[in-house]
Image (spheres, helix red, strand yellow):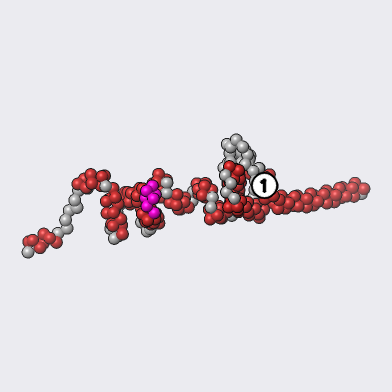
Amino acid sequence: KHQNNHKNQPREPYPVHIFASCFMENPKMLRLILTHCNRNKCPLTPSLRRTLLELTLAEWNQAKRTGDTEAEKLRRKEAIASLTDSHCREIGDYDALVIVQLAGFEEGELLLYERLQMGPMLLSRYAKDGTEKARRQMLAMAQSDGDVLADVLGYFVNMVAERLADAEDVDDGEESDDEVNDILEDISECLALARRQNILPPVRIARILAGEGTGQFSSAGVNGGQSQARTVPLSVALDYVGDILDESRKEISRLKVEVEEYNQLCNSMEAE
C-alpha cells in the first residue's frame, strides 16, 4: 500500500542542467522535444517558444543550404505556425521580428510587419520582392494615404529603371519586356489613383516620375542619394498629364470669365 501511494505521488522534474550539454551538442533533439510538447498542448514558457522558433529557423536555413527541399518546406510550415497560432503573442512580436530577421526568413518578416503596422518597412519589403502580388499589395496600401502613394510611385519608378538597366546588360527577351510593361501599367494605375485622391500636387508627381525622389521639397525618399536620376517613359504619364492640362485650361477659362465679369461690374459702378 505504501508503495502504491509512493507511485501515485507526482515526481519532481529533473534539473535542466543534466540535459544542457546534450542539447548544446545536439540542438535538433531540443527542437524535437519542444515540438512534441507544443503539438501535445504542453505548457511552454515564452522563452521556450522563442527557442523553438529559433531552432526551427536554424534547421530551415540548414535545409536551404543542403538543398533538402522536403525539410525546408516542413520547417517553413512549422515556423509560420509558430508565428500565427494561438500562442504566437507569447513569443512577443518584436522578439519574433528580431529572430526572423536574423534568420533571413522574409515570409515571417512580412507577416510581422503587417501585424505591427510598420508601413515603411512593409513597403520596402514588397518593393524588394517586386512580384505582381507584392505590387498589388503596395497599391492597396496607397488607397488612403498620399504620402504612401508618393512612396509607392517612387518604388515603381525605381523598379522600371532597374529592369531597363538590367535588360541592357542581359538580353532576357520578351519576359523582361512583359515585366516592365506590367510595372508601367501599375504606374498608370497609381497615377489614376492620384487623380482621384487629389492629394499630391502634380508638380510633386512629375518630380517622382523624373526620378528626383518622393520628398515634398527635396530629393529625399526611396530614390534619394542616387547619382543618376531614374525615369520612366513619358508615354506612361500622358493620360495623367493630359487630364491635368485639361483641368488647368478649364480653370484658367473660368478665372478669365470671372475677371471679365468683375471688370464689367467695376466699369458699370464707375459709370454710375
> For the residue carrying disc 1, how many other residues have a C-alpha within 10 Å: few (<14), some (14-19), or many (20+)?
few
How far from the left and from the top, in percent, is residue 183? 60, 51
Instruction: Classify residue 196 by image quadrant.
Output: bottom right
Rendered residue at 11%/59% (across/down): 6
Rendered residue at 92%/49% (across/down): 272
Residue farthest to the bottom?
1
Rendered residue at 7%/61% (across/down): 2
Instruction: Check disc 1 and give the amino acid type.
Output: Pro
The residues colored magenta run 63-69
Secondary structure of the residue carrying tag 1 is: loop
How far from the left and from the top, in percent, is residue 144? 59, 54
Residue farthest to the top?
227
Q: Is residue 192 left or right of residue 261?
A: left
Rendered residue at 54%/50% (across/down): 130
- Camera sees residue 98: no
- Camera sees residue 263: yes
Q: Residue 9 or 113: which is nearer the viewer?
A: 113
Picture quarter with the N terminus: bottom left
How far from the left and from the top, in percent, is residue 102? 40, 44
Does the magenta portion include 67? Answer: yes
How far from the left and from the top, in percent, is residue 228? 61, 37
Does the magenta portion include 126? Answer: no
Q: Residue 165 or 190: which is nearer the viewer?
A: 165
Q: What main secondary structure does the magenta stretch of the protein show?
A: helix
**Residue that carries the numbered disc 1 in the rendered image:** 233
